[in-house]
């Protein structure tokens, strides 16, 4: 329903852990990731801001994140404002990720041919950054950050923080993937899995019209229980969960119930002015997302696991 092909696929659900998974993985997945797929359409924007000012921003971030350079920060504070994203988006993630310095390795798995996450980490001052995705056409760089046409299982090295931003559910062999994550993650390092969650209000309400099902690209739609069990078997210990559903989950699912594909001309995602929803309805979807996040039953969540050293 993303592209409106309306092709059908069979899924089954485990009675014990509630993980929802595809019965048969299609032999050719590349056709389900056409050029119109969102993660392949990044624009390589050039940063036109003054480089000296960027250095001052990084100095302020250094103090905010690691508590270093306090005296210099006091001088800069009246003239250099911390970006909104630093305080509201990245500071909570960095604290949970337990990153110790700007030189710590950060890996974004399944980022397409770009990674806004890595680009923003670079703006903050982080230097050891890498993205990987086996579905991209060729190896590239995004804002001078290397993006490799590889699976995480093909990598070497050591990372303090490994991120999967809605890519883990696209991986047909999560067992091999987690073995690689365990190998690449340094002791005490953190893995963030941001994934759709089947143990959610939206799945119960919309069923097969749940926009996060996204057949057949999503092979495994975990429950909170199943993802914890799976990662725990590889020595990754869950220590925090952040639910982050948005209005997208409700608007997309409502559209699917009305047989409107995500990329249709009258979709809220493509043409908000021609979509079937009023501004008040979209606002209600946003309030509903806030509610399910608050109550711990959102259809999207970030799971933070630490490498506890166990095998």
Image (cartoon, grey):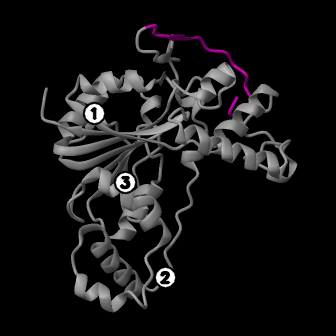
Mark 2 vs mark 1, CA separation in Å? 37 Å
Residue appearing at x 21%, y 58% in the figure: 104
Q: Is residue 40 above or below residue 75?
A: above
> Which residue position is annotated with label 3?
93
Quarter of the image for residue 69 reads bottom left
**Would residue 268 appear left or right of 201 to someone viewing this image?**
right
Mark 1 vs mark 3, CA separation in Å? 24 Å
Q: Which residues are magenta?
A: 1-15
Marker disc for residue 49: 2
Marks 1 and 2: in contact by CB < 8 Å?
Answer: no
> Which residue position is annotated with label 1?
153
Residue appearing at x 55%, y 35% in the figure: 298
Counting from the top left corner in percent of width and height, residue 46 is at 51, 72
Counting from the top left corner in percent of width and height, residue 163 is at 36, 45
Give the mark, 1 or 3, whose residue is nearer the N terminus.
3
Counting from the top left corner in percent of width and height, residue 43 is at 57, 60
In front: 222, or 67?
67
In front: 115, or 186?
186
Specify the farthest residue to the top. Answer: 15
């Amino acid at each position: 329903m993303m592209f409106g092909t309306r092709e059908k696929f069979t899924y089954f659900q485990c009675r014990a852990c509630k993980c929802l998974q595809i019965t048969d993985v299609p032999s050719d997945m590349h056709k389900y990731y056409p050029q119109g797929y969102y993660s392949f359409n990044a624009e390589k924007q050039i940063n036109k801001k003054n480089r000296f000012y960027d250095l001052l921003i990084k100095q302020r971030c250094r103090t905010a994140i690691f508590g270093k350079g306090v005296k210099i920060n006091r001088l800069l504070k009246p003239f250099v404002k911390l970006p909104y994203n630093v305080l509201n988006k990245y500071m909570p993630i960095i604290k949970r990720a337990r990153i110790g310095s700007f030189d710590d390795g950060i890996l974004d798995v399944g980022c397409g041919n770009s990674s806004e996450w890595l680009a923003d980490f670079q703006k903050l001052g982080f230097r050891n950054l890498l993205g990987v995705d086996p579905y991209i056409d060729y190896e590239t760089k995004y804002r001078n950050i290397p993006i490799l046409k590889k699976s995480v299982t093909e990598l070497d090295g050591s990372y303090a923080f490994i991120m999967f931003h809605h890519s883990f559910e696209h991986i047909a062999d999560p067992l091999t993937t987690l073995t690689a994550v365990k190998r690449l993650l340094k002791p005490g390092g953190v893995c963030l899995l941001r994934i759709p969650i089947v143990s959610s209000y939206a799945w119960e309400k919309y069923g097969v019209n749940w926009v996060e099902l996204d057949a057949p690209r999503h092979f495994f739609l975990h429950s909170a229980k199943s993802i914890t069990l799976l990662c725990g078997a590889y020595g990754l210990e869950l220590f925090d969960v952040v639910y982050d559903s948005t209005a997208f989950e409700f608007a997309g699912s409502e559209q699917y119930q009305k047989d409107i594909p995500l990329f249709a001309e009258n979709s809220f995602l493509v043409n908000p002015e021609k979509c079937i929803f009023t501004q008040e309805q979209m606002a209600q979807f946003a309030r509903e997302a806030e509610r399910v996040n608050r109550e711990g039953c959102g259809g999207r969540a970030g799971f933070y696991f630490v490498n506890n050293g166990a095998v």
